[in-house]
């Protein structure tokens, strides 16, 4: 079984303008789509609402608001996306009405979601995907913002202040998933940092100890290390964001994780270039930069990265593959 993982996927703002004049397949090159289709299951972080309703979240400190039209689900279908996590700081950018529309639009497109719901219990509930003989349980959570947290009688996201530690409900949700593969996909830590911060590392270890087969995080907008069954940050997948010339958030990776039964054995990272509202395979110079950055990030954790057929490969050892416990 092969699992595709992509980070922040923002289909709002200027991406909306591109969708208005071009078909869904204009946002990703054919080669990127083909790489995504190698996987049996594709999970990504959807960093916007999908709706044509709602009002901006009334927080004067909030600078960015992302909302995509219903046609944006065609982009996800083109990529073969099976499930998105909505546990992030943009799911409620246009309020509860837009979030509820997002649920309906995803459902109509045949795409599952996790990390948000009509109430607290639903938002915190895992999503189960079945592919052949494989069953994958997915748990989504975000550590910001607190105001977006679902309540017993209010729609919202699955929120946990991971800076204060991993709460019991989250450890119980991970440990209670009765599937061969358990994926935890947290939106954690600050933007635009080059490596995972202390509370992210601690939370990753706690997720693994609770029974997570694989942890795949996002939020930093740049990719981080892979180590001990954890992809600390998947980076960005598509957006209209300004580029940091040092951290290069315009250069990213699509991660393909291979499993032997329920054990992750290999990660193939496909180098990407994020142009304005369009994602393609990286050219040789761009891929070389990505490779240097990935090797440096992984070396801190003792993880080896090799290059094979234009991709960056990490082979998991048995120690990496087994959750602590």
Image: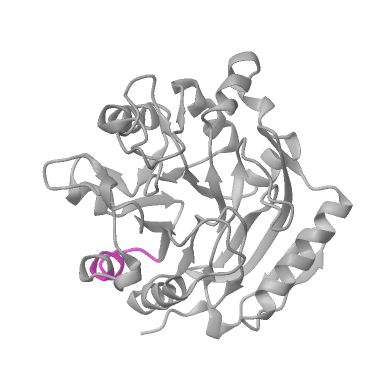
Please give the name of the residue rendered at 32% of the width and 23% of the height, measured from the top-left corner.
54
Q: Residue furthest top?
A: 21
Please give the name of the residue rendered at 50% of the width and 71% of the height, measured from the top-left corner.
197
Residue 107 vertical placement versus 71 (above, below): below
> In this orientation, does residue 140 appear?
no
Of residues 206 and 196, which is closer to you in this image?
Answer: 196
Q: Determine the image quadrant of residue 133.
A: bottom left
* Side of 233 relative to 27 (left or right): left
Look at the image and say whether residue 152 sits in the magenta stretch.
no
Q: Position of residue 50 (x, y in %)?
A: 41, 29
Q: Residue furthest right?
A: 284
Q: Position of residue 242 (x, y in %)?
A: 65, 41
Quadrant housing the C terminus: bottom left
Q: Residue furthest front?
A: 60
Quadrant housing the N terminus: bottom right
Please give the name of the residue rendered at 70% of the width and 47% of the height, measured from the top-left corner.
250
Q: Position of residue 172 (x, y in %)?
A: 23, 69
Magenta span of residues: 171-180
> In this orientation, does residue 98 appear?
yes
Residue 5 vertical placement versus 172 (above, below): above
Look at the image and say whether residue 175 sits in the magenta stretch.
yes
* Side of 72 relative to 117 (left or right): right
Residue 34 vertical placement versus 106 (above, below): below
């Amino acid at each position: 079984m092969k699992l595709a993982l992509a980070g922040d996927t923002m289909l709002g703002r200027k991406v909306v303008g591109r969708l208005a004049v071009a078909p869904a397949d204009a946002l990703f090159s054919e080669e990127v789509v083909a790489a995504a289709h190698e996987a049996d299951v594709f999970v990504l972080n959807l960093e916007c609402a999908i709706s044509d309703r709602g009002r901006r979240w009334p927080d004067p400190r909030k600078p960015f608001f992302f909302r995509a039209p219903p046609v944006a689900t065609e982009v996800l279908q083109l990529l073969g996306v099976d499930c998105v996590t909505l546990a992030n700081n943009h799911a409620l950018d246009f309020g509860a009405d837009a979030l509820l529309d997002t649920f309906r639009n995803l459902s109509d497109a045949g795409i599952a979601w996790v990390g948000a719901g009509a109430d607290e219990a639903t938002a915190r509930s895992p999503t189960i995907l079945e592919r052949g003989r494989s069953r994958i349980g997915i748990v989504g959570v975000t550590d910001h913002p607190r105001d977006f947290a679902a309540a017993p009688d209010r729609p919202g996201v699955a929120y946990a202040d991971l800076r204060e530690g991993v709460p019991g409900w989250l450890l119980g949700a991970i440990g209670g998933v009765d599937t061969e593969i358990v994926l935890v996909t947290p939106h954690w830590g600050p933007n635009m940092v080059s490596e995972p911060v202390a509370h992210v590392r601690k939370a990753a270890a706690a997720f693994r100890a609770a029974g997570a087969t694989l942890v795949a995080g996002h939020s930093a907008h740049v990719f981080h290390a892979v180590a001990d069954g954890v992809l600390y940050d998947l980076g960005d997948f598509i957006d209209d964001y300004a580029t940091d010339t040092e951290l290069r958030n315009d250069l990213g990776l699509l991660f393909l994780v291979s499993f032997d039964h329920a054990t992750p054995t290999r990660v193939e990272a496909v180098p990407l270039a994020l142009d304005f509202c369009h994602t393609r395979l990286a050219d040789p110079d761009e891929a070389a930069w990505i490779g240097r950055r990935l090797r440096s990030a992984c070396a801190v954790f003792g993880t080896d990265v090799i290059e094979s057929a234009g991709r960056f490969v990490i082979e998991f050892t048995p120690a990496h593959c087994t959750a602590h416990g």
